[in-house]
Amino acid sequence: MRAGLVLKETGVGLRRNLSLTIAVIITVAVTLTLVGAGLLIRRQIEDMKDFWYDKINVSIYLCGNSSPEPTCAGQAVTQAQRDTIRSQLEAMPIVKQVYYESSAQAYTNYKKLFKNSPDLVKNVDPTALPESFRVKLTDPQKFDVIRTQFAGEQGVQLVQTQSDVLRKLFRLLHGFQAGAFAFAIGLVVAAALLIFNTIRIAAYSRRRETGIMRLVGASRLYVQLPFLLEGAVVGFIGAAIGAGVLVLLKWLFVDKGLRPNIPAINFIGWDWVPTVLPLLALAAVAFSVVASFVTVQRYTRV
Amino acid sequence: MITFESVSKTYPTSPRPALSGVTVTIAESQFVFLVGPSGSGKSTVLRLILREEKPTGGRVVIMDTDVARLPSRKIPALRRQIGVVFQDFRLLPNRTVRQNVAFALEVIGKSRAAVRELVPETLELVGLQGKADRMPDELSGGEQQRVAIARAYVNRPRILLADEPTGNLDPATSVGLMKLLDRINRTGTTVIMATHDSQIVDSMRRRVIELDAGHVVRDQARGVYGYAP
């Protein structure tokens, strides 16, 4: 086996179908970018879930003097009701911790939260904010249990959780992720067909050479290797470009676009570059080689 | 060297067998003409020897190997023992004479040194020593066929198959080519040549195997063409 000759054949093959070669490279690159984006979004979702669910409280607001809810019966929560609710909460296995926030504490927190907007603070009656129980759950996703149990209880004005907002956000992100993967699947099919076509045309344009190779007794590997290398080279270039685009997009959207504007969210960093990218690139190269191999089996006889 | 034992071959696309019950033995360093009308099975015989096809019945034994039972990864080794020349030369148009001949050695992994030694030697044998750097389309038909023979012979195969090698050549050129094939045969290479060229067969006086509709109808040690179209 003479490596130089095989590599020369590979180079000739790639140049001969330059337009198709470029098409394959672009398709592989875009596919890899989308798969990578899908994976990154998923990672972001997981990170945010860990971060947020840890902080999530279910708030059980108790009735105030003028609460209109029927469970309040037009009067503020009584000490007896307050104690019942607390002991019921503490008896539930999914409840990790219960904090009580009085009306006055709520006002203090409110002032802290809106310290930059004095108008908002000025317009709120210090006694108007409802007292509440803040409940931490062992499994934050099970807040509905709390809601069903306490929503109709006497003395409870409202059961609320930040999860409602987060759920919408997560649904949106899941949507992005599913979209990216769906696109990626379509592109994987397109890439397979393109590679199939490229190698088929390469095999056709080299049929004179391969025919003679066969007759003079070149081994199967020698005949097919240039085609497989073509697949590998195209896959590698496509993967490299795709990885570059992914890094660029992450930097542009997350680091430049989102992070400065939404400081509350802990966005993903760069730790995936050495772990996820090489695997993706390897998968892209392997995919191209396998697609080439399948084609070559069909279009070069031995 | 080559033995056909009641070989039949039926192609899936044709109801009529291309060969039926062919039994022939060709000894080492023989020169054999295969004659017969178009479609009589000459090319099928060559394709069976090259193991491009498997027989549908009987056995084809080449150098003590039943080719039908040869695993496909061993086919290249068989073909390295067999050189082939065609009527249409089948040279690579974008390579020089030297590169065309070297190609046959390079693709079977021969070393650079072997290529440097064997290619000029073989070009000299076929009488093209001064034309190594020409492109195929700058050569005459006879010269192109000599390049094809050089390519087929450069690895010193033990069998040389020629499928109508003079079919595209004028009679004078054909004579020169036959002298070359004769010279190769005298080095001990078995030569099997399928042909329609009665003049050549008659003048060479070598073994003639005549096929008709897939049957051997004549096998003469020093035959003539003898087939009336």
Image (cartoon, helix red, strand yellow):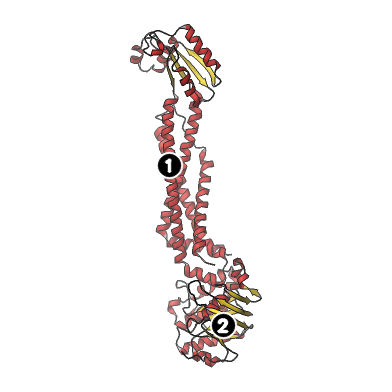
- x%, y% of residue B45? 55, 79
* Point 44% across, 39% down: residue: A177
Q: Which residue is mark 1?
A: A180
* Point 58% across, 80% down: residue: B21
**Compared to A143, does A44 lie above or below?**
below
In contact (CB < 8 Å): disc 2 and disc 1: no
Nearer to the camera, A65 or A116: A65
* Point 45% across, 29% down: residue: A265
Judge the density around disc 1: few (<14), some (14-19), many (≥20) Cα neighbours within 10 Å.
many
Judge the density around disc 2: few (<14), some (14-19), many (≥20) Cα neighbours within 10 Å.
many
- x%, y% of residue A119? 33, 15
Quadrant of the image occupied by residue A164: top left
Q: Amino acid at mark 1?
A: Ala
* Point 44% across, 52% down: residue: A191
Q: Which chain letter matches label 1?
A: A
Q: Amino acid at mark 2?
A: Ile
Numbered disc 2: secondary structure: strand
Counting every numbered tag in the picture gives 2
The quarter of the rendered structure image containing the N terminus of chain B is: bottom right
Nearer to the camera, B168 or A178: A178
Query: Visible in this render: residue A252?
Result: yes
Q: Which chain letter matches label 2?
A: B
Numbered disc 1: secondary structure: helix
Q: Which mark is residue B192?
A: 2
**Compared to B146, does A25 lie above or below?**
above
